[in-house]
Amino acid sequence: MTVINTIRGIGHRIINAVWRIGVAARFFFLTLLYSGNSFRRFHLIIKELFSSGVMSLIIIIVAGLFVGMVLGLQGYETLKRYGSESALGVMVALGLVRELGPVMAALLFASRAGSAMTAEIGLMKATEQISAMEMMAVNPIARIVAPRFWAGVISMPLLAALFSAVGIFGGYLVGVVQIGVDEGSFWSQMQAAVDFREDILNGVIKSLVFGTVVTLIALFEGFDAPPTAEGVSGATTRTVVTSSLAILMLDFVLTAIMFRGA
Amino acid sequence: MSPPALVEIRDLNFTYDKRPVLQGINMTFPRGKLVAIMGLSGCGKTTLLRHIGGALKPNRGYVRMDGQVMHELSPAGLYAMRRKMGMLFQFGALFTDMSVYDNVAFQMREHTDLPEDIIRSLVVMKLNAVGLRGAQNMMPSELSGGMARRVALARTVALDPMLIMYDEPFAGLDPISLSVIGDLIRRLNDALGATSIIVTHDIQESLKIVDYVYFMANGVIVAEGTPDELRASDTDFVRQFMHGEMDGPVPFHYPGADYRLDLNLRA
Amino acid sequence: MERTTLDLWVGMFVVAGIAALVFLAMKVGNLGTYNVSNTYEVHAYFSNVGGLKPKASIRDAGVLVGRVTAINLDTQRYEANVVMSIDKRYQFPKDTFANILTSGLLGEQYIGLMPGGDTEMLKNGDQIKQTQSAMVLEDLISKFMFSKAAEPAAK
C-alpha cells in the first residue's frame, strides 16, 4: 500500500507541476496579448523601469566592480604561472561578457527586483486591489503585469552590460593600476580576442532571455500567490529560488548552443 | 406596475468544491433603493456580490442587470457592464502605489479621454463630496482606516455608476467614521440616483439607512422586509441576529463530539 | 515621485546602459577596430593551415588589417583554401607573401602578410599566390631527424 501511495504522490506532483507550467504559459501569452496598452502609454513602463532598473543600479555596479577586481587578482595569479599576464584583459573581458555579466546581473536582478515584484503583486492581490481593478473594468494583466514585464525585459540587458563594463574596469584597476600589467597589452589583446557578434551580442541575447524568464517567474508567482501573508512570503521565496535555478540551467543550454565549436 | 428593477436574482445556485454556497436565492433590487444583505460571516454574501459583478458563474439561475444576464455576457460585454457598476471593497482596496488623487482619477484616465484639467475638477468634486479634498496628495498608507474608506468611496463613484455595491463598508471603523460612512452611502445613492447593495453584518448602522433588508444564513434567504418590519419581527433567527443573543437558531457550540466523551469521562 | 524626476532617472539609467553596451562593443570588442562593410576579399591556398581558425587576425608589421572569414578544403588540389577579408584602407601589391605564424610560443595562429614590390594592387576576389604553411611540430622534428640521418652518408 505504501508503494502505491508513494507512486500516487509522485504522479500527483508531476500532474501539478505540468499543470502549473501550463498556467504559466497561458499567463505569458496573455501578457504578450495585452501589451499594446503599455506601449501606447509608455509612462507606465517608465515608472516600472524606475523601480526595477534604476533601483537595481547600485547593487549591480558594486557587485560588478568587486567581481571584476577578484577576476583581475585570480586571473593574474593563474596567468603568471604560464608567463602570459598580458592575456589578463582577455580573460577578464571574456569571463564577464560571456558568462558572469549576464548570469550575475540576472541573479542579482531576481533577488532585488524579482522578489519585490512578486511581493508587490501578491500584496495587491491580498488587499483586493486586483479584484478592485477587475471590477473597474480594467484588465489587471494589461495594467499591472505587462508594464512590469517589459520594464524587466528592457532593464536586464542594460544592467548586464553595466555589470560587465564596470567589472572590466575593476579588472583594469587591479591588473593595470595596482599590479602593473602593461596597459597596452591589456586593452589590445582584449580587443583582438573579444568578438562583437560571437561574444558581446551573445551575452546580450543571454541577458534578454534571462530578463524575460526572471520577470515572468516573478510576475506569475505574485499573481498566483494565495492572498495571505504566508502565501505572499512563500511566493517571494519561490521567485528567487525558481528564477536562480532557471538562470543557471538556461545559461548552460544557451552556452552549449552559442559557443560550442567556436 | 412599477418600472423593472435594476438587478434581479432568480433561483441562483452556486456550489464551490461540492459545498453548496448559494441555494435558490431570489432577490430584487429596485432602482434608486438602498438594499442590505445581512447574515453571519461565511453565509455566502460576498459570493453573491461576486455573482452580481459577473466574476463567478452560477450553477443554476441567473443575475439580470439592466436587462442583461451577467453570466451570458462576452468578456467585452462584461467589461462594458462593469463600467456601470462601482464596488467598495471591505478595506477599501486603494492602489497603494498611487496618491489619493491618482486613485480617484484612475478610472477616468483608464476609461475616458478627458483632458487632465477636467479630470482634476472631477476628482476635486468627488473628494469634496467625501470631505477629503485636503488629502488629495497623501498616499494611502498615510490615511486612517475611516479616511481610506472615504477615499475608496470617492473612487467607487468616480464614473457615476448606476449600481454601487458595498462589501462590509462598516468593518473595523470607529463609531464616528461608521456613521459618517453610513450617511455618505445614503446621500451618494440619492444624489447620483443610483441603486446600492450593502453587504454587512452591522445591523444598527445599516437599519438606519437602508430601504429593504435580506437576511441570509447558510446560503438561503431566511427573512426579508423593510427595517420596520424586521424590528417588529418575531422570527427566532431575526431576533437572535438583531439583538446579538448568544444562543438560538444559530448555536453557540460548533457541532462536535459529546462534551463528556471529549473530556474522557465515562458516562 | 514627480513624473519629471522619474523620467530623468530612467533616462539616465537607459543612457548609462547603452553607453556600457557601446563601451563593450568599441573598446572591449573588435567593432571599433574592424569594420565589416569596408573590406575586400582575397584568398590563398596553404598546404597546411595548422591551428588557424576562422576569425583569426591578419597582420602586416604587427598591425591588424583583416580577419580570416572561411577555411575550406579544396578537393581538386587537396589544399586548404583560406578566405580573408582585408580593410579597404590597406592595399597590398599582387606579389604579397602570406605566412601562417604563431604569436608567442603557445599563442594563437594568425596570418602575417609581407608586401612585395609589384606596382599592381590586390583586388576583391584575387588570389595570393605565394604562401607559407603553418609550422607543424611533427614535420619540424621529422625534417630534423632526416637531415641528421642523411649527414653521415654524405661523409
Image (cartoon, rainbow, N blue to C red):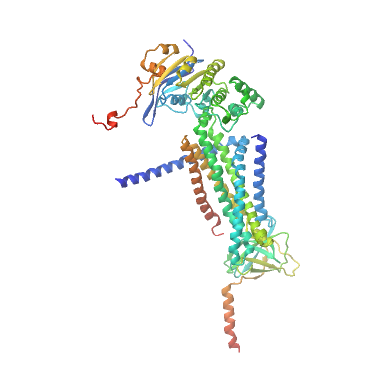
**Residue A15 image offset from top left, x and y in percent:** 40, 43
Q: Residue at horizontal 61%, vertical 37%?
A: A47
**Residue A120 image offset from top left, x and y in percent:** 54, 37
The answer to whether any part of residue B4 appears in the image is: no
Residue B92 vertical position relative to residue C131 in the rendered view, above or below: above
In-image side of C105 versus C95 (left or right): left
For the residue pair C95 and B123, the one nearer the viewer reads as: B123
Residue C118 vertical position relative to residue B231 in the rendered view, above or below: below
For the residue pair C13 and B240, the one nearer the viewer reads as: B240
For the residue pair A126 and A26, the one nearer the viewer reads as: A126
Residue that lies at the very extreme toward the bottom in this rendered image: C155
The answer to whether any part of residue A129 appears in the image is: yes
Q: Quadrant of the C terminus of chain B?
A: top left
**Residue B215 image offset from top left, x and y in percent:** 41, 18
Residue C77 vertical position relative to residue B113 in the rendered view, above or below: below
**Residue B231 image offset from top left, x and y in percent:** 42, 12
Residue that lies at the very extreme toward the left in this rendered image: B267
